[in-house]
Amino acid sequence: MEYVERYLQTASRIIDKVDRSQVCRMIDVLKEIKKDHGRIFFLGVGGSAANASHAVNDFRKICGFEAYTPVDNVSELSARTNDDGWETVFVNWLRQSRLSAGDAIFVFSVGGGDVAKNVSPNIVRAVQYAKERKAKVLGIVGRNGGHTALHADACVVIPPVDTETITPHTEAFQAVIWHLLVSHPELKQNEMKWESVAKGEKNGDIS
């Protein structure tokens, strides 16, 4: 029970500390991308890769963005890793996708990449390439000092309130923040299933 209480209290403190201005900045960037019919490419590894796949669904279905992630194609991802190396797996995929100035990469990562420590070099290379192509860089990460946070146009850093649970809380709050984004009235294009059901029940429209 002690750990349960500590974990949930940490989550509560994180919510209080999340930088709202960065969330709003992210919304503004996404509105600009949508207006210009740009694409979003979600990048992540490990648990963040699963989040990237989930986010693609939400941004496409709920908000009407053209969105993709390289982790959805395990054949290409593994082939590029095997033939070209893990460090370039994302940047080569973005190059093949013809990343342009109207597009954005959206990084989900705990550390955000670190050149000096050789941590997530694939994320670092992708961010560098996006900046070269003048594409927008967005991120939800768990460290202020990571490459993504330092170079993004908008980046929500999940406050590292408890150093023993940085990874689980960062990956959990990636979902909290992207669900905030896709449900925001300035981005949402289509109603979600259970919200539409609830509205029908409230209005007495039950078949």
Image: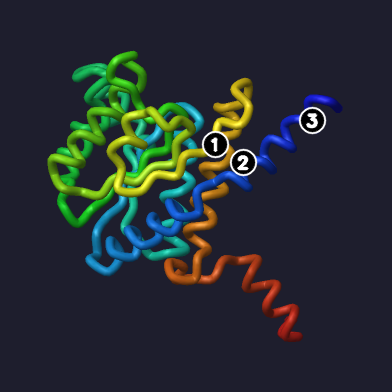
| Residue 57 placement, left or right of 191 | left
Q: Which tag, 3 or 1, sits closer to the chain's start? A: 3
| Residue 147 placement, left or right of 99 | right
Toward the viewer: 154 or 48?
154
* 32 versus 108 height, above or below: below
Identify residue for label 3. 4
Identify residue for label 1. 159
**Which secondary structure lies at badge 1?**
loop
Identify residue for label 2. 14
Q: Are marks 1 and 2 in contact (CB under 8 Å)?
A: yes
- Residue drawn 38% across the image and 65% down it: 64
Q: How did the renderer colour the structure?
A: rainbow
Which amino acid is tagged 2? Ile
- Residue drawn 22% across the image and 24% down it: 88
Q: Residue furthest bottom?
A: 204
Q: Which quadrant does the N terminus fall into?
A: top right
